Amino acid sequence: MEAFLTGLDSLMNPQVIVAIIIGSVGGLIIGAVPGIGPAIAIAILLPATVFLDDLVSLVLLLGVYGSSMYGGAIPAILINTPGTPVNALTTYDGYAMTRRGQATRALSLAYSASFFGGCFSILAALIALFAFGPYLRDLGALFGQRDILMAAVLGAVLLIAAHRQTMGLAALLFAFGFLIAMIGRQTTRQIDRYTFDIDYLFAGFNLIVVIVGIFALSQSLILLTGKDDDPPEARVTRGALLGFTELAKRKTIAVFSACYGTVMGIIPGVGEFVAQFFSYSTARALSKEPSRFGHGSPEGLVASETANNAVPAAAMIPLLALGVPGEALTAMMMVVFFDAGIKPGPDIFENNPDFLFSLFTALLIINLLVLITLLISSRTIAKMIYIPNRFLGALIMILSFVGVFSIRNSLTDCIFAAGFGYLGFILRRLNWPLVPIVLGLVLGSIIIERIAAGAGQVKSLVDLVNRPVSGTLFIVILCVLGFILWTSIQNRQQADQ
Amino acid sequence: MKAPKDIYLFEDGLPGGTVDGFKSECPPDKKFKVENLFEFKRGRGDLAISAFFLGLALFFLIFFFTETGWDKRKLPQPFGTYLAHQLGLVEMEGRVPRFGRLLKQSWLIPMICLALLVPVAIWNFRASLRVYKWRQRFGLPTDMRYEFEKYGQALEYVGYFILYTLAVPILGYLLSTLILGTFLTWRLGYRSRKWIGIGFASSFAIVLVFRSFLQIKTPVSIWLYDQLPAALRGFMLTYF
């Protein structure tokens, strides 16, 4: 309780309050504009966080992360274009409702479902912190260098497994990210890895340079070389509060969708997509009117929106508990931890429990603030849909420069960011997944660091896996690898038939 | 709360994708599965970029022996027996070196990475080549020119970005940003006064927020500012 109160106290800081407001309202707008998305916004904001307090930075990024999916539902429902990729399923039922003249009903239902999903997972995390906090403090002692190393390896394996039909590509791009992470001078023995005697490479690639290039600049190039959309006109009327009454009638779907979102969010590498598709298909299986799914079913809308909004808070759990990010956005947040000198992982329960309470309480406030903003200004935010894509591309390019340059005052960084941006542009055009590159960088850095730190305790190969946690994680890794192999064989057999 | 075993989101095809006026006696299989949402098809530029990644993997493999400290390696001898001992296959006599010493060596991480990168790059290139040949065989378009034209178009904007980067130490962050913001708006075809004004104002707003308000770092030595009177130079360097 003391930690909770200390956490609340740190949220009273005016800087934090401003970060909550900017993050949540900004994220809402970013989500509502198709073509930007939270990953690009966070990539651009990352360098600015270097100059801010760690809690302020994280709250700002969490605001963008948590609120963008609310905003993303607006164009998904009104113009059949998801604001963020995870709102794709919302278009199926949301836009069908708009075509039937029920745009306001669909929006209000999406807002209330999102709010429910968001608050459900935050409250679940807070209750878990209250209930298990004292025990979690002892968890730190169980986690050594080798255990975190295994957790990072598990994160990598899950990431690759989650890419289903593109596992080979995910493995290739993960290895590419890992390769970038290792370039530079090895600190312990002063041996250079792939530096080719180029001064710039001695310090290695800065994580933010790669992230801004791969995510922000590449998307800017996609927008600049594409065409402007011509979205149809959509009208939003008053009555956004009615969604809560309708949600109450569909509480079963809302609750299991929120559960799916929370559970899938916790598993590294899985995330919003799988959560919402599982909840959507389950909702359809349980529904009395399954044929309406995809044709304007409110239940379908509730299932997809609840599940994807339950993920952000849950996705913070593996990041905070194990120090292992599960997807791109939490990987970017990891950079804030690196800069702040905080090492997320089991020790955080012992050393900074108030920090955890601050984060989750801030997320709760963000959800509330977003809902209020949406209820009073839905019509204004809906107008953001009409900003031309290519003009946005130009703005993202200008913002990317300041983002990259401010890190080390290096023009070379900007030129390398341009190179990564160009590569990201080509990969985006070919539909290759970009997330494995970033996770390769972040998890690769963790693996390199933990191998170096844990080497002193390793007498034999078995020592890597003979601890309770590392052993368990190793078994899980083997199981996941076995599952991948089994599904590959099954798919091959089906294809042959 | 168990997920259905066989997940079909839309058994009758994607929403909005059906034509109500015609019904065949033998409808095509339009079941839409979860797997379809993750469906990936290799496009026309795929072979080129797969070849690029294979080349990159081989490049790093070739330089592994000179760029990772491999030449300064310290391997326990006989190494094969040592590895077999670590895997519990044989016993070694005398004092066995710690495995941790091997983990500390600088070439180990690159070796682990290349052990993943090189095989998957070869596999990916092979898969891409198979799709390319398949397209050729069935007379599907394989010409990559359109894709390369798009890459060329993007290079133009990459060029603007690099020029902007080089212009900042000469003209300063404010002027360079205003020029780029206005020029890009014009270049993209928004040539009315209204849009040029919006482009100019947006660029100015970015400078105000990031440089004047957030005090994000920009180059400290700017040629144009050096030509200004001392007081104005200090002001410009601090806020713009």
Image (cartoon, coloured by chain):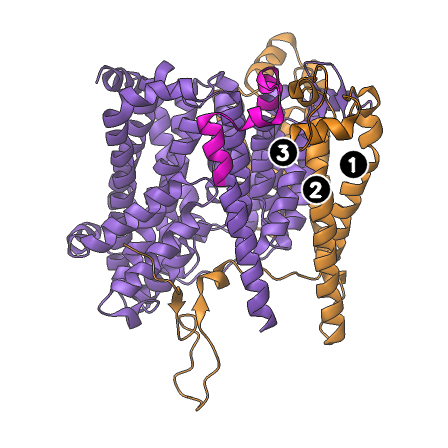
Chain colours: A purple, B orange
Q: CA distance from mark 1 to mark 3?
A: 19 Å
Foreground residue among A291 and A52: A291
Give residue A188's position: percent from left, percent from top: 68, 13
Q: Which residue is mark 1?
A: B60
Give residue A221's position: percent from left, percent from top: 63, 46
Which residue is at a point 49% across and 38% down the rendered structure image? A475
User: Given the image, on which type of amino acid does mark 2 rest?
Assistant: Leu
User: Given the image, on which type of amino acid does mark 1 rest?
Assistant: Phe
For the residues bearing labels 1 and 2, Cβ distance under 8 angstroms: yes
Q: Could you tell me which secondary element the residue under label 3 belongs to?
A: helix
Q: Which residue is mark 3?
A: A210
Can residue B74 be spotted in the picture?
yes
Q: Residues within 10 Å of mark 2 (few under 14, many from 20)?
A: many
For the residues bearing labels 1 and 3, Cβ distance under 8 angstroms: no
The answer to whether residue B22 is above or below residue A246 is below
The answer to whether residue A53 is above or below residue A107 is above
**Residue B145 drawn in magenta:** no
Chain of the residue under the numbered disc 1 shown in the image: B
Which residue is at a point 71% across and 39% down the rendered structure image? B115
Q: CA distance from mark 3 to mark 2?
A: 19 Å
Which residue is at a point 49% across and 16% down the rendered structure image? A341
User: Given the image, on which type of amino acid does mark 3 rest?
Assistant: Val
The C terminus of chain A: image quadrant: bottom right
Foreground residue among A165 and B148: A165
Chain of the residue under the numbered disc 2 shown in the image: B
Q: Could you tell me which secondary element the residue under label 2 belongs to?
A: helix
Q: Residues within 10 Å of mark 1 (few under 14, many from 20)?
A: some
Give residue A236's position: percent from left, percent from top: 28, 56
Q: Which mark is residue B117?
A: 2
- Tell me where the magenta segment starts and ends, as one range: A450-476
